[in-house]
Image (spheres, grey):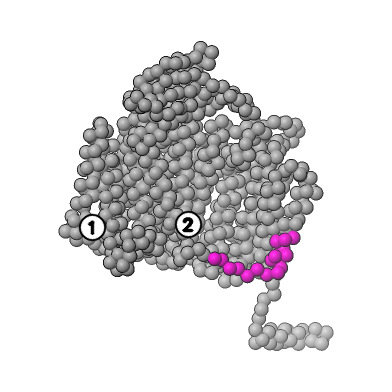
């Protein structure tokens, strides 16, 4: 599998380079053959990298310890899901996963736009090809996941880090990578529009869904990471301003601003410069985030090891991205000049401009504070750390300002809103904000002014969203004579975009309830003896004893707790420590949580003595934290509503030639023969992987056929062109005389 995977990556480098070159040359010369071949090369690139991914997964599943990367991250006793997720669990494999996702996304984007964006599509392909070439270069020459042991092959693997052996490991990194990689597509089309000079809003149609889907995947990845930190790391919170957490937050901030700018450009024709700038910055920050996690320039529990050479390569690439991208943008600034000024600062588009500046300011603060320890070390040889207090001091005011703008965006109208109408629309949200603050003060959650203001603004946003939704439903009932539910369904599933946006804002308000609740969290560390009960806030916790279990991978020591609330049983909790046989010095903490909408009771176990019957437990109350997950679910539902194809389920009809089917079937058959006869895979190998490999190899063969077919196909010419060609040839022969004339 090592040789096969390495060969696939080499072929991918050739295909990516060819796709970019053929598309550029074809666009400059107007050569339809090269353009079609360049598009097909992108399909082939996706298929070939799919084969490389299948080879990597097969190596993990079958325990091929001749591959260094597999031996370092694999464990024969691990569940199948963790063997597969080990593919992206380390530096080398995550690079391959990154570029494989990019190839698949690029193939989808090229296919869906092949008939619509003909002027800019070749340049978009070239941009994607350059990015793919960069990562393929890193894989081949710097971090090859298929690198093998040359002499002695180990008989066992070291296993995945215990912190990564968690269900969120299977979902969190792919979601985050999906958001990172997905933002390459808007960047590619933005650069294609700048290069080609096609600066109208047509290119936005090609990226609208990509931008929203990438933002959704980034949001999903960040939230899954927060849940992972909350339920696995065991420190009691969900966001610590860790450098790798910040690496995911940075492009999310600019991507959020980009979505708002796109909306204004489509609706009012404003903010074109903002849209291009934010598309560039969002892509740059995905590369910057990848650079921070993989170069080791920052210290983080999530980061990979330090690699100075890799850091310099990334730095050079990021510098070129900024210089080339902004050079094209500056060259087109005059053409992107606004055709008319904003009608009023009391308008929705003006609020979006303010929000954009706040998002960019937040990104700058997070980037500077994250890099400050590294910069201080480079300048003074002393690493000065930046704690969570610094981030909170700056980000809390920015977050509160963004919350206020979020509420106002739901109230303000396009163009301009009259002051009497604005006052009328503000009455209910302001009252809701004041009442919300009063309720939380009455329940004893008023000690933090910033948190109280955050809670009040969450109530303000909720009321503003409900008010606008009710206004839309009432208007729909009057115009279409529908009931309340039917009118609401029409707004959400037919008109969709503005009202799904309101739901996203409502989800943000709910999530900020959870953020604000962290200001009122309380924790204690208590040493319990078996049978002992202790009061913690309104809870009574009794330590009933230990239980010890063991499986093929690890030994598990669990503390059994009984929790009483107001004298009544509230449930049992089982915090634990897991000791993996391959990594005995890296015990994993298993958190126990008693969940509730008002607060969570969060318990972890530290030092313990099973024989002596004592355990050190950390008990934490986290008010309102579960509202964060509910808010995200609402945001996810709104994003999915917008991403649904319009007018029902789209049915794709494609004409498939007999030759295409034949090539695909031959490729699949060749894959099966290769798997069974050449590599002599045992019958116990997962048949699903073998079948997937055959299918992808068939697609590879089809894509290569599509790439070469335009170049080998005879050119169809008219009878007039043919007659002129014959006459020209005859005159040339007569001029040559002798045998040539005959």
Membership of 654 in magenta stretch = yes
- Front residue of this view, candidates 308 and 162: 162
Q: Is 715 placed above or below 531 here?
A: below
Q: Which residues are magenta?
A: 651-666
Left or right of 670, for residue 368: left
Q: Residue 697 sits in which quadrant?
A: bottom right
Left or right of 550, for residue 337: left
Q: Position of residue 24 (x, y in %)?
A: 57, 63
Q: Position of residue 472 (x, y in %)?
A: 30, 61
Of mark 1 and mark 2, the one earlier in the sequence is 2
Membership of 292 in magenta stretch = no
Tell me which residue sits at (66%, 44%) in the image: 56
Secondary structure found at label 1: loop
Q: Residue furthest front?
A: 568
Left or right of 276, for residue 309: right
Label for residue 359? none
Observer able to see residue 619: no
Q: Residue furthest left?
A: 420
Q: Label 1, label 2: how many angstroms apart (C-alpha)?
A: 31 Å
């Amino acid at each position: 599998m090592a040789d096969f995977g390495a060969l696939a990556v080499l072929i991918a480098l050739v295909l990516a380079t060819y796709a970019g070159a053929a598309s550029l040359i074809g666009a400059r010369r107007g050569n339809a053959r090269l353009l079609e071949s360049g598009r097909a090369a992108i399909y082939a690139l996706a298929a070939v990298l799919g084969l490389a991914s299948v080879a990597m997964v097969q190596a993990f599943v079958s325990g091929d310890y001749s591959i260094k990367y597999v031996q370092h991250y694999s464990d024969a006793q691990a569940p199948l899901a963790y063997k597969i997720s080990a593919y992206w669990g380390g530096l080398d494999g995550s690079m391959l996963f990154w570029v494989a996702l990019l190839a698949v996304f690029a193939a989808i984007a090229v296919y869906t736009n092949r008939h619509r964006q003909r002027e800019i599509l070749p340049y978009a392909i070239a941009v994607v090809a350059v990015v793919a070439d960069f990562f393929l270069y890193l894989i081949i020459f710097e971090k090859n996941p298929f690198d093998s042991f040359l002499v002695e092959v180990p008989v066992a693997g070291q296993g995945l880090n215990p912190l990564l052996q968690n269900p969120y490991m299977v979902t969190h990194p792919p979601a985050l990578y999906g958001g990172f990689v997905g933002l390459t597509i808007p960047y590619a089309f933005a650069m294609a529009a700048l290069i080609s000079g096609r600066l109208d809003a047509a290119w936005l149609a090609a990226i609208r869904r990509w931008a929203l889907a990438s933002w959704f995947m980034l949001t999903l990845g960040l939230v899954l990471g927060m849940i992972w930190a909350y339920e696995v790391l065991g420190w009691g919170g969900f966001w610590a301003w860790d450098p790798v957490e910040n690496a995911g937050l940075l492009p999310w901030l600019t991507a959020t601003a980009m979505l708002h700018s796109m909306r204004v450009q489509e609706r009012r024709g404003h903010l074109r410069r903002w849209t291009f700038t934010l598309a560039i910055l969002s892509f740059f920050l995905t590369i910057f985030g990848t650079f921070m996690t993989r170069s080791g320039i920052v210290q983080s529990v999530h980061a990979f090891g330090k690699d100075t050479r890799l850091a310099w390569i990334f730095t050079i690439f990021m510098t070129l991205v900024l210089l080339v991208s902004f050079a094209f943008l500056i060259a087109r600034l005059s053409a992107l000049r606004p055709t008319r000024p904003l009608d009023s600062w009391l308008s929705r588009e003006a609020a979006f401009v303010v929000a954009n500046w706040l998002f960019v300011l937040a990104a700058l603060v997070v980037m500077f504070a994250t890099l400050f320890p590294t910069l201080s070390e480079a300048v003074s040889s002393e690493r000065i750390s930046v704690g969570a207090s610094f981030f909170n001091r700056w980000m809390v005011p920015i977050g509160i300002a963004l919350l206020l703008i979020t509420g106002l965006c739901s109230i303000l109208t396009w163009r301009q809103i009259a002051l009497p109408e604005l006052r009328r629309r503000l009455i209910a949200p302001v009252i809701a904000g004041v009442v919300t603050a009063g309720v939380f003060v009455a329940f004893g959650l008023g000690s933090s002014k910033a948190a109280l203001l955050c809670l009040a603004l969450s109530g303000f946003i909720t009321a503003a969203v409900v008010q606008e939704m009710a206004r839309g439903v009432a208007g729909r009932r009057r115009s279409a004579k529908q009931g309340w539910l039917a009118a609401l369904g029409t707004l959400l599933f037919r008109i969709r975009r503005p009202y799904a946006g309101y739901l996203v804002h409502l989800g943000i308000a709910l999530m900020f309830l959870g953020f604000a609740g962290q200001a009122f969290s309380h924790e204690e560390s208590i040493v319990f003896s078996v049978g002992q009960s202790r009061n913690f806030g309104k809870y009574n916790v009794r330590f009933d004893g230990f239980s010890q279990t063991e499986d093929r991978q690890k030994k598990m020591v669990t503390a059994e707790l009984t929790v009483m609330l107001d004298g009544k049983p509230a449930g049992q909790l089982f915090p634990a420590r897991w000791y993996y046989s391959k990594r005995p010095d890296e015990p994993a903490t298993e958190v126990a949580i008693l969940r509730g909408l008002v607060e969570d009771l969060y318990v972890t176990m530290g030092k313990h003595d099973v024989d002596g019957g004592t355990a050190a437990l950390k008990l934490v109350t986290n008010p309102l934290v579960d509202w964060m997950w509910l808010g995200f679910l609402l945001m996810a539902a709104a994003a999915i509503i917008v991403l649904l194809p319009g007018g029902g389920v789209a049915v794709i009809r494609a004409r498939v030639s007999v030759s295409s089917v034949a090539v695909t079937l031959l490729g699949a058959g060749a894959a099966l023969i290769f798997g069974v006869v050449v590599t002599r895979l045992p019958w116990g190998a997962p048949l699903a992987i073998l079948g997937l490999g055959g299918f992808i190899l068939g697609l590879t063969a089809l894509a290569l056929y599509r790439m070469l077919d335009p170049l080998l196909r005879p050119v169809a010419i008219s009878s007039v062109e043919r007659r002129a060609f014959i006459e020209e040839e005859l005159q040339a022969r007569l001029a040559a005389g002798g045998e040539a004339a005959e």
